[in-house]
Amino acid sequence: MARNTRELAQRPAVDPRDEPSAEWGWHGSFPRGSVIAGWVVVVILLLFNFTNNNLVNNTANVWLTGLAILMAIGLVMHSARKRTAWRR
């Protein structure tokens, strides 16, 4: 504890080489937020198919749908891997 009002309490130091974000006071991740953002991106990619006015070919539609499916597979695999016992 501080002895007077001008002294600051000493806290255990964190080496910024181990945790680079310790320099600015916060480090962490948003596991739930990143999954929600991933599903929002999947929905947006699928909605782009309805706004595409390319009548000559469907190349853009194939790419948008393919990327949405690939992201959805990745999100499902991430969710399954997170729930299994062999995670770290």
Image: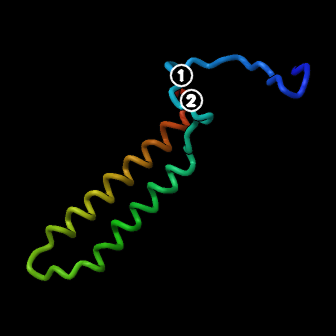
Quarter of image, res 46:
bottom left
Relative horizontal placement of residue 5, taking residue 8 as reference (left or right): right
Colour pattern: rainbow
Residue 24 at x, y = what percent?
Answer: 58, 34
Residue 77 at x, y = what percent?
Answer: 42, 43
Report, in whole angstroms, how far the alpha carbon at label 2 lies from the one at label 1.
6 Å
Q: Can you see residue 86?
A: no
Res. 16 mark? 1
Residue 39 at x, y = what percent?
Answer: 45, 58
Q: What amino acid type should be assigned to the residue bearing mark 2? A: Glu
| Residue 58 or residue 21, whichever sits in front | 21
- Please tell me whether mark 2 sits on a helix, a strand or a loop: helix
| Residue 24 or residue 40, whichever sits in front | 24
- Identify residue for label 2: 23
Relative horizontal placement of residue 51, taking residue 42 as reference (left or right): left
Q: Residue at (80%, 24%) from the top-left corner?
A: 8
Q: Residue at (34%, 66%) from the top-left corner?
A: 45
Quadrant including the N terminus: top right
Does 63 appear above or below 6?
A: below
Q: Residue at (21%, 69%) from the top-left corner?
A: 61
Q: Residue at (50%, 51%) from the top-left corner?
A: 35
